[in-house]
Image (cartoon, helix red, strand yellow):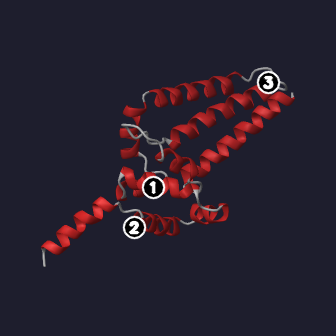
């Protein structure tokens, strides 16, 4: 009984966290995904993660109700089907994210950040996010406008020296 209750509590917390991410009120996991190195950028799929947690929640709820109701079959089967589809989406990530980012605009701040920044700038924003105090992160989580102002300052503050030399050459060549 306690194991089922603990499983149910974990799925409720995971489902709530995923809902906050999709709504755009919790930016940490998406920003953490930007700091990874490698040849390809692996963009997060927050709605697929939400579906996976919803499937786990349905399975946990089905197991919990099996103590009181003799047939929890629809909940467990539905949850397993949802988790199977979410697992396939994670497995075929490179195919799914192309369609995902064209069709699903959530969270909006993430799509706007992808359109405004390069991979290098997103990585810098992610690393600077790690150095923010907890209360400031809460402020930026709740206000997209404040977050984008901060992100613009990070981008302006981290222009590489090579880039500034190129800009200087073009600036002085016109005079």
Q: Secondary structure at mark 1?
A: helix
Q: Quadrant of residue 175?
A: bottom left
Pointer 3: residues within 10 angstroms few (<14), some, or many (20+)? some
Q: Quadrant of the N terminus?
A: top right
Q: Quadrant of residue 73?
A: top right
Q: Is residue 128 above or below residue 97?
A: below
Between disc 1 and disc 2, whose residue precedes? 1
Extreme residue toward the bottom, this view: 175
Between disc 3 and disc 1, whose residue precedes? 3
Q: Quadrant of residue 155?
A: bottom left
Between disc 2 and disc 3, whose residue precedes? 3
Extreme residue toward the left, this view: 174
> Which label number is shown at residue 66?
3
- Residue identifier under label 1: 124
Q: Residue 126: x percent and y percent?
A: 50, 53
User: Residue 161 or 97: which is nearer the viewer?
Assistant: 161
> Which label number is shown at residue 156?
2
Q: Residue 72: x percent and y percent?
A: 73, 24
């Amino acid at each position: 009984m306690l194991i089922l209750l603990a499983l149910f509590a974990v799925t409720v917390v995971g489902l709530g966290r995923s809902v906050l991410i999709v709504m755009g009120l919790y930016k940490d996991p998406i920003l953490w995904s930007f700091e990874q190195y490698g040849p390809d950028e692996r963009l997060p799929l927050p709605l697929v993660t939400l579906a996976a947690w919803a499937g786990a929640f349905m399975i946990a709820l089905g197991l919990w109700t099996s103590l009181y109701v003799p047939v929890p079959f629809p909940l467990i089967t539905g949850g397993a089907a949802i988790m199977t589809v979410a697992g396939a989406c994670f497995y075929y990530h490179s195919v799914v994210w192309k369609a995902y980012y064209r069709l699903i605009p959530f969270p909006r701040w993430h799509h706007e950040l992808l359109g405004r920044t390069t991979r290098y700038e997103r990585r810098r924003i992610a690393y600077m996010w790690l150095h923010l105090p907890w209360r400031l992160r809460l402020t930026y989580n709740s206000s997209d406008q404040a977050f984008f102002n901060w992100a613009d300052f990070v981008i302006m503050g981290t222009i590489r020296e090579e880039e500034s030399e190129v800009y200087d050459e073009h600036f002085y060549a016109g005079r």
